[in-house]
Structures are given as C-alpha cells and as structure tokens.
Amino acid sequence: MKAYFRKMKGGGTAPPMTSIVNIFWSFIGAFAGIATIHFSPMSSLSSSDYNLVVGSFGASAVLIYGAVDSPLAQPRNLIGGHIISALIGVYCYQLLAPDIWLAAALAVASAIVAMHLTKTLHPPGGATALIAVIGSPALHKTGYFYALVPIARGAFILLVIALIVNNIPKGRRYPKYW
C-alpha cells in the first residue's frame, strides 16, 4: 500500500517555461480559432449548447496552439477524436436516454477506448461525447448530424487556422504528422 501512495508524490521535474514567441503565437492562434468558430454558423444550437461546444473547442485550442508538438494535438487526433467521440456520444444518448448518468459515463469511457484504438486520443473529445448526452432536446434532435455541424466543422476551422498560424514563426512546425 505504501508503494501505491508513493507514486502520488511524483518525482520528475516540471518542464521549462516556453518562449515568449511561442506564447504570442499560441495567443494569436487561439484567438483566431475561437473567434472564427464564434462567427461561423453552427446550426440551430441553443445558446447553452453552443457554449458547451465552444468550451470543448477551447480545450482543443490549448492543445493545437499551445502544445503543438504534443501527439494529442496532431490533426488526426483533433479531427478524429472529436468526430468519433461525437458519434459515440449520440449513440449512447439514443441507447440509454432515460438514464442520463449512465449514458454520459458510457459515452466518455467508450470515446476514450475508441480514440485509443484509432490512435486519435484528443482529451476534448471526452467533452464532445459528454455534450452529445447532456445537451438540450434541440441538440438531441440533430442526432448524428451533431458530428458534422458543429463538431467536424469547428474542428476543421481550428485545424486550418493551426496550419496557418503555427507555421509562421521560425522553429515552430505543425503538424508533426497527419
């Protein structure tokens, strides 16, 4: 038991601070990405559903603009992670709708498994799956279309901006792989 709790102490060192140039370009990318999503039509989402979806994309922005070298930030992870998770979330809601707690838990857990198996692990995908379950009745009515608009559309907007912005400064390259 002591060995188990000893693991929680950590033991590594914190990474060094990133450069001011990288911080600047992370800001520019995130600002442009989220602003573009905000001003592009995202279907007939209610304002509360819209806020949930943009929250998920905000987490993606942290990865693709702030941690460009991370495997979790690569295009296949961004696009695949969101779309796969959206489809799973819709399926779980349709299968288990009366038991929202069960649908939500199964959606997130299954999305993680599917992202691992497809090598598309993207943490905001968990939120995307969850939103498909906890969203409003209007969001539920969109069914699997939710995976296209707003999810695929928003992820592709973030990707296009990441490809442009992340390749402007010297020493910064995106993507590492597709």
Image (tube, rainbow, N blue to C red):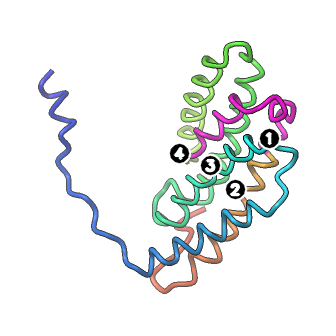
Can the viewer see residue 121?
no
Q: Which residues are magenta?
A: 124-147
Identify residue for label 2: 155
Task: Please determine whether, in this image, residue 20 is positioned above or below residue 159.
Answer: below
Q: Which comes sooner in the sequence, label 4 or label 2?
A: 4
Query: With 56 as the anchor, is 62 left or right in this view?
Result: left
Can the viewer see residue 97?
yes
Image coordinates for residue 80, horizontal then vertical, percent: 66, 48
Mark 3, other Cα within 10 Å: few <14 / some 14–19 / many ≥20: some
As drawn, the label of residue 55 is 3
- Give the CA separation, mark 4 to mark 3: 12 Å
Farthest residue, direction left: 2
- Give the CA separation, mark 4 to mark 2: 13 Å
Query: Within the magenta stretch, is there residue 11?
Result: no
Identify residue for label 4: 123
Image coordinates for residue 148, horizontal then vertical, percent: 81, 47
Q: Which comes sooner in the sequence, label 4 or label 3?
A: 3
As drawn, the label of residue 146 is 1
- Give the CA separation, mark 1 to mark 4: 18 Å
Farthest residue, direction front: 47
Q: Amino acid at mark 1?
A: Tyr
Farthest residue, direction top: 98
Give the camera-side residue of 155 and 42: 42
- Give the CA separation, mark 3 to mark 2: 12 Å
Query: Within the magenta stretch, is there residue 140?
Result: yes
Q: Which comes sooner in the sequence, label 3 or label 1?
A: 3
Mark 2, other Cα within 10 Å: few <14 / some 14–19 / many ≥20: many
The answer to whether the residue labelled 4 contacts the one labelled 2, judged by CB atoms less than 8 Å apart, is: no
Mark 4, other Cα within 10 Å: few <14 / some 14–19 / many ≥20: many
The residue that appears at 22% across and 36% down in the rendered structure is 8
Choose mark 3 or mark 2, whichever is in front.
Answer: 3
